[in-house]
Structures are given as C-alpha cells and as structure tokens.
Image (cartoon, rainbow, N blue to C red):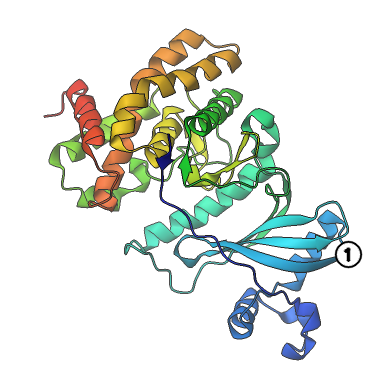
C-alpha cells in the first residue's frame, strides 16, 4: 500500500561558471561581496560562487576543480539555496552546499514575513550550524546524517559544506511510501532519540520543533478554535515538563528523509533540532505521510514499531517508564502541532477528523472546557 505526501521542489541541472573565470566582471575578487555574487547569478542566469567559498570546498575535499553544479532547492522564503557541487579529483565526487543569504525584503508564501519570523529563521541556521559542528558526529548508521566537511558564517550569512548523501548511497526521495519505508523512518527516529536521551541541548534550540507555542504567538493569536486556544499553554507545559527528554529533529517530515536502494534511511535539515519529547517527531512524521483513515488504522502498530526499536537501544534508564510516558504524550504532541496548524493555515489538508478527535481527547484530559 502506498501512502502519499506533498512533494518538494527539485531543481534541474544548470551551467557552472566560477568567479575565477569571469575576471572581466569584477576588478578585484577579494572585494566581491555576497550581494555581488547574487547579482551575478541573476544576470548570468546560472550559478556563480564566492571565490572564498569555492576555495573552502576545494580545500576540504582536496579536489582540483569544480566542474558543475545542480540546484537542489531554494530555502524557505528566499533565504538562500541548497546546491550539489560536482568535483574533479579529491576525496568526494560531489558535495552539497547550504548557502544562507537572507533576502533584503523577506517574503512568505502565506504572508508570515514579520520580524519575529525573520529572527526565528536566522536562529534556525545558527542552530543548524551548531548541530553539524558539535552534535552530528555522535550519530551512527542507525540514525544516519550527512557529515559536515566545513562551515563558516559572517553576520547573518551561513555556509555549510555537507556530504552528498546521494553519492553515499541514499539517492531516493519519496512522495509516497510503503509500510517498510515508514517503519524505517520510525526506527531512525527511535535510534536518534535513544542516542540523545536526557542530554541537554547545548547550542541547539532549548525547545526543538518549529511550531512550539513560545515561538508561535502570532499564530496562537489568530487561532479561532476557542477551546484549543485556551488549552494551548497547558499542552505545551505537559510536553516541556515530561520526565524524559531527548533531542528532537524538529522537522521530521517525509521530505527530509533520504532512502537507499536497500531500505536504509538518512535524515537532513536540522534547523529546528533541540530539546523535547520524542513524540513530537513521531506525531509530525506520521502526519506527513498518512491520511486520517491510515492514522486511525495504523496508529498503534506504528507506535509499536517505534517503541520496540527504542526499547532495544536505551540504556541506564527505566525503559518501561519512558515508554509509558511517551505513549501518553503522543496525543499531546499531535494536539500541539494541530494548534499551530489551525492558526497558521486554517484550511490546511492536515486539519481532519483524526486530529480533531485526538485534540479533543487531550483537552478533555486537561479539563479544558
């Protein structure tokens, strides 16, 4: 059986010209700013790279030259781009570059382009760089992530050179999935949460996930569901004060998982990684690839897949107590995202009878009238 999900944009191939071969375009390479580079991108119609960034890529990969590039996607709200860089010689045939360059005038497809959203995005890239520099090396093959080869930032601009997971055996992206692929992602999440169980999220978001209440007051203000609005703080309190905390991915949708031909999984996009209950990732992931009928039918079997993997990997904790608490908090995590979604995009397809039922159950438990 196939389960569907919204697909992401994937760019087509593009030409490549280094700044080093367009000397006539500038008088002095050292004076080239990122704005200059962006203007050249637009004028030439294909990718141009800052010479310092190009030199960094060549240094860390020991490559002789950059031979081509391929756009993967634009970052949300025009904050930069992700590109695949093809290399000649060296240790890597290709790398992936995440190049964050905030726009002069931020925009948002749904109109959320205020100062709070801008600040949240900038912090998210700072956190992602901290994740790759300080945390990602703790992940093993059970919760595979890209290796970070190099990174740097200046002011509000961030540049990360990452392992190309396509070249490392994870070339597949799915917009619809079989049960085996859903189970593989749940096992990745369980391994990730077990790896970082009860660790303080130093350098990451103190509270992971992009939708938590403290970071989304504007959406809460616009929430028309009076009862859910009244219970939002209590739901958040329960999740934040859970006995067992881990590090959560924070945006664990299907689109952020990369698959190998033999069914293994890796994950990308760690802008909202931080502290939290593991059920936040699990509820959000299942909502990204299951419709409401599948959620009703498969909730318990899929939770068992996750908890079986978690039980087999946690150490030095009361595994039974952990499972008992997190099973109860699955509904709270679902209701928490439902609260955000109803304020952010009231007509979203994920607002369905299953979500309404789960949220009502949580509000009943909290005695919110």
From the top left corner, tell me how far across and down residue 172 is, in percent.
60, 46
Q: Position of residue 193 (x, y in %)?
A: 54, 27
**Name of the residue lying farthest toward the front:** 1
Secondary element type, mark 1:
loop
Q: Residue 127 location, x and y as percent?
A: 56, 47
Residue in view at x 32 percent, y 64 percent: 111
State the residue lying farthest toward the left.
369
Q: Nearer the viewer, residue 257 or 237?
A: 257
Q: Quadrant of residue 328?
A: top left
Considering the image in quadrants, where does the C terminus appear?
Answer: top left
Give coordinates of residue 144: x percent, y percent: 65, 35
Q: Which residue is mark 1?
A: 64
Whether residue 355 can be seen here: yes
Whether 38 is drawn above or below 198: the answer is below
Image quadrant in which the N terminus is located: top left
The residue located at (52%, 61%) in the rendering is 75
- Residue 330, quarter of the rendered image: top left
Residue count near mark 1 (Cα–Cα under 10 Å), binned few <14, some 14–19, many ≥20: few
Relative horizontal placement of residue 158, taking residue 137 as reference (left or right): left
What residue appears at the point 55 percent right and 45 percent down from the top-left corner?
Answer: 270
Foreground of the two, 236 or 192: 192
Number of marks in the image?
1
């Amino acid at each position: 059986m196939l389960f569907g999900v919204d697909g992401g944009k994937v760019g087509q191939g593009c030409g490549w010209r280094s700044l080093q071969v367009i000397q006539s375009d500038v008088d002095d390479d050292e004076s080239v700013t990122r704005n200059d580079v962006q203007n050249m991108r637009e004028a030439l119609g294909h990718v141009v790279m800052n010479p310092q960034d190009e030199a960094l890529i060549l240094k860390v990969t020991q490559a002789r030259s950059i031979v081509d590039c391929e756009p993967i996607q634009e970052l949300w709200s025009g904050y930069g781009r992700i590109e695949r860089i093809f290399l000649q010689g060296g240790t890597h045939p290709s790398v992936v570059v995440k190049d964050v360059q905030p726009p002069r005038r931020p925009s948002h497809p749904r109109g959320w382009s205020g100062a709070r959203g801008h600040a949240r995005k900038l912090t998210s890239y700072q956190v992602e760089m901290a994740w790759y520099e300080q945390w990602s090396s703790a992940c093993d093959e059970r919760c595979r992530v890209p290796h970070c080869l190099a990174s740097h930032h200046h002011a509000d601009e961030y540049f990360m050179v990452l392992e190309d997971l396509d070249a490392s055996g994870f070339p597949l992206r799915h917009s619809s999935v079989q049960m085996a692929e859903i189970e593989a992602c749940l096992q990745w999440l369980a391994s990730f949460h077990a790896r970082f169980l009860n660790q303080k999220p130093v350098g990451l978001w103190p509270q992971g996930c992009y939708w938590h209440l403290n970071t989304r007051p504007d959406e809460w203000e616009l929430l028309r569901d009076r009862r859910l609005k009244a219970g939002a703080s209590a739901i958040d309190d329960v999740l934040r004060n859970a006995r067992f905390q881990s590090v959560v991915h924070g945006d664990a949708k299907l689109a952020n998982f990369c698959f190998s031909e033999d069914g293994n999984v890796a994950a990308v996009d760690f802008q909202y990684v931080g502290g939290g209950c593991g059920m936040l990732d699990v509820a959000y992931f299942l909502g990204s690839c299951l419709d409401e009928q599948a959620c009703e039918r498969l909730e318990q079997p899929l939770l068992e897949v996750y908890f079986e993997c978690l039980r087999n990997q946690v150490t030095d904790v009361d595994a039974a107590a952990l499972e008992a608490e997190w099973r109860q908090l699955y509904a709270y995590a679902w209701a928490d995202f439902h609260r955000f979604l109803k304020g952010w995009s009231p007509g979203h397809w994920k607002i369905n009878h299953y979500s309404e039922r789960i949220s009502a159950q949580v509000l009943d438990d909290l005695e919110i009238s």
